[in-house]
Amino acid sequence: MNDRLRACWVVGGLTLAIFSLSAQEWTSPVRGSWVQAGAGKEHDIVLADAPAGSGCEIVVAPGEHSAVHQAAEFLAADIARISGYRPPLVAHRGDSPAAIHLVTLTDGVVVPPGIDRAQLAGQWEAYQVLSTDHDVWLVGSNFRGTAFAAYTLSERLGIDPLYHWTGYEPEHHPVLILRQTDFRAGPPVFRYRGFFHDDEDILPRPLDANGYPDGTYGSVATEWYERFFETALRLRLNQVAPYTRVRRRFEIQKMASDWGLYYSSHHYDILLSNPWGFKRHGLADSRRAGGKWDWYENREGMLRFWRAGVEENKSLDCIWPVGLRNNDDKNYAFPAGTPMEEKRRVFGEVIAAQVEMTKNLLPPGKDPVFHLTMYNASLDIFQSGPILMPPEVIQVWNDDGIGHMRALPAPAMPGRRHGVYYHLAYVAWPLGDTVQSQHVVAPSTIASQFRDIVNSGATEYMLLNVSELREFIMEARMIAEICWDSSLALGSSDPAGRYIGWWAREYFGDAAVPHVVNAYRHYYALLDTPQATWWDSDRVKDALGRLYRQFVGLPTAANPDMRSKMRARDHAYGAAFAAIAEAKKPMSAECRQFFYEHVEFPLLIGARQLSAALKLETAADTSDPATRETLCKAALADVCRLEAEIARAERPPFTGWYRNTWVRRKEHETELHRSFRNIQAYCDLAFEDSDFTRHSLLEATSATLLAGTDRYTETLAETAVSNETLKFTIDFRVHQDAFRSEPFFHAGIISASNTSATPRLAARAVLNSWAKGSFDAWASMEPLGVYRAASAPMAALGWDTNATPIDRDSEALRLIFTARHDTKVDTWITRCSILNRESGYILHSVDESVTAPSLSEDGPLKFVLAMDGPHPGTFLHLDRVRVEKLTPHTPRQPSVSGFRPPRHQVTAESIPSLAPRL
């Protein structure tokens, strides 16, 4: 074993480490393992005696690096969390009964004889933890080694390195006693290793116009970066790429560097220049970089843009990305027909210019580190032939986005340093391959792939894509341990099994281990690919498609093969939850909550939806309306439970963690709330007779053709509408002679005296043919003025997507709009749905709530449908209008658990024969 792979050193044939256990051994608990239970023994040290108000002090020389001072601050806070006593930080040893010394080894530093200078000297991030009579020495070969010694001590005293995500509090010891210790950690196998917080979709603020976290102009709160950076340091990582699609703040990258993390970035953030802001944030203009991202035509402009990144960050510890990619996360656009040889020449020329410029700009004493990630097309270019570039550039090889390496350096590639870019989180376009809400890269995959990585020699650099981290902490910790000591971590015949067993013991207790291991076995069998995370949601979508076709009178047939797969998967979920139930029995409440978040809840996301889908399919099979309604409401109960379970997983500080975002976007497979909303929408459309008494206000059949500013009006049979629900059903077709025309129209009610072109209470619908192959629908209530967008395949509307668009009518559409005025808060509660009458496809459904007065005092009321201004060549064929007043049979449910409950009285108790098995 060479020196870089040693976890503890041997002198004279005797191992000096009294407590040499490393997390990488994955055999025994680590957290709290250095705490002496009960009375102290000879050579133990009392670090805190909270009842007596005394304890140790932490000694850090003023000249130590800021990363060491930060580690000391964390250590003091950790001891306070464990004992209730917070040690003071001092520059020199005082008269406290004990002291913890943080020391970086240099020629002039005095350390006790037990510190092995010879083994530490000149090593990369190695360290030793040594207790003497009344002192604890945390000594590093460099400042990061010293900081890692402090984080190691914190964990051995009881602090979970992942506590921000697990929620674990340390075991309380008012009298905290450290056992006699001599622990030594050799240098890590991977020199540069860290997290990439890619695709920020939950945390950016403010929210944009769609209610999504703003990933274009928003930013992430400092407290989240503090959590990211602290977690990385406690796992002994030394770099971070904190941004992708948010506004950057220099104090964040400075904080990373000050705390001991190299500030770095991803493969298209060349020289940390922030190409995301090239146009979005006005950086191209402020840096005089020109408007074209073109090396042939705007070489000097691109160099000026990159230079600004170096100038901004040259005072920090950085790892500088080099290469050539677009100013968004896309391949660089070479002119069509550019041969590979020319592409290789340009890459070499660009990288050489970037390296030379950085070296010239950095202050004395800053030795730059460069990495080139050969992502997608870049890998193809590099594999096509040799590229001349500076030898100090680390070549970084990437995986396929879900943990399988695309390529690795061959033995015939000596003389250059190599590393890897690896994904636990991944956002793909289209979104079907996205991994964001559940962890799917199994420890067995990680062990296999990292064995190959280590054997290939690609150990100079490791960047791990974890997005916003929470879902991926188990596998992230495994990779962090491999990166420190791969020979130890991967040394057994089954390193993944050994790690899962250790994780089960470390995080859930000895008594739960076999059942936890079994639960993880079921977990990774069910969630083994990105597609497995949304397969169940799509089954709900398919089943609703059958029901909608029946709703508009179209035939539909079951798919026996798919039904068989659904039942088999449902059975597998049942086995998984049986294992989970056994695993939870011996756990503490704290462990049960984390186990819920990490294992049970990710499975519930699919299981609840699959259970609902099976009920919906059975509902579609039956010809009995009452049975169909019972089954659909039982399906709605399943997804209502899921909404409550989502709320449980959104404990502070993770409030709103599973909301819709630009990744978890509405109506896409990545959205967790899609099934709840869509089943509820179907029930609202199909079963209102069961909850309401209906009173017809208007029933009209019309062949009216509206164009321009035309209006269609009909007087309603009644005028009293306060505290009751109005339902509008409008059947229509849209004719367009221009493919990109935008037919807007309003439907609602107005008073007889109202002369406005816009109804006072209105469902505003916008149908828009944006591009060939798609048809968009917006629906909302006026005067709220907020529009929600959803896309449906144009084929669902009957458009011939293989031919040039011609003059024609759309397929028959139906707008269903319900509105109820709540006089207590003077608010209208509305739902607007647009569906295709011929295919049964629901194009869009949206709920709104807006403060507006009642219409009860306005005198005679009329229904109105109005075009919203002239749209040449666009006509609305109005086929039928129905307006009803609905009076509920039963009171509505109150809003609970952070989500709007269904309009129907659905509870587990109301369907005793369909009680949940989960």
Image (cartoon, grey):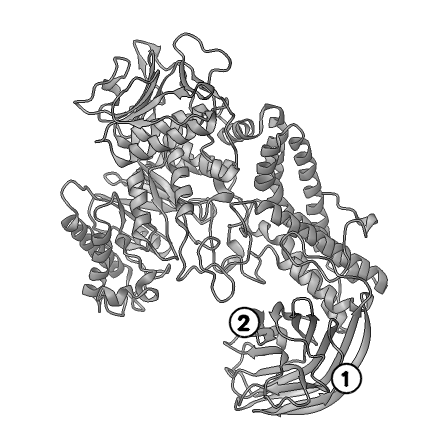
Q: Residue at x 19, y 47 (%)?
A: 390
Horizontal arrangement in the rendering, residue 594 relative to residue 231 (left or right): right
Q: Position of residue 394 (x, y in %)?
A: 27, 44
Quadrant assignment for the C terminus: top right
Q: Position of residue 668 (x, y in %)?
A: 57, 61
Marks 1 & 2, CB-CB < 8 Å contact = no
- Which mark is on residue 786? 2
Work out whether 94 lies above or below 675. Answer: above
Q: Which residue type does callout 2 highlight?
A: Val
Give the residue number, with chain letter if any, for mark 1: 698
Quadrant assignment for the N terminus: top left
Q: Residue at x 61, y 90 (%)?
A: 755
Q: Position of residue 236 (x, y in %)?
A: 37, 33
Q: Residue at x 57, y 47 (%)?
A: 650
Residues packed near mark 1 inside 10 Å, few (<14), some (14 to 19) or many (20 plus) = some
Work out whether 381 lies above or below 878. Answer: above
Horizontal arrangement in the rendering, residue 699 relative to residue 325 (left or right): right
User: Observer-nearest residue: 93 or 107?
Assistant: 93
User: Observer-nearest residue: 754 or 652?
Assistant: 754
Q: Residue furthest top?
A: 42
Give the CA distance from mark 1 to mark 2. Answer: 28 Å
Residues packed near mark 2 inside 10 Å, few (<14), some (14 to 19) or many (20 plus) = some
Q: Which residue type does callout 1 highlight?
A: Leu
Name the image quarter holding residue 855: bottom right
Identify the mark nearer the N-term, 1 or 2: 1
- Which mark is on residue 901? none
User: Observer-nearest residue: 307 or 907?
Assistant: 907
Q: Position of residue 584 (x, y in %)?
A: 65, 32
Q: Secondary structure at mark 2?
A: loop
Horizontal arrangement in the rendering, residue 780 relative to residue 89 (left or right): right
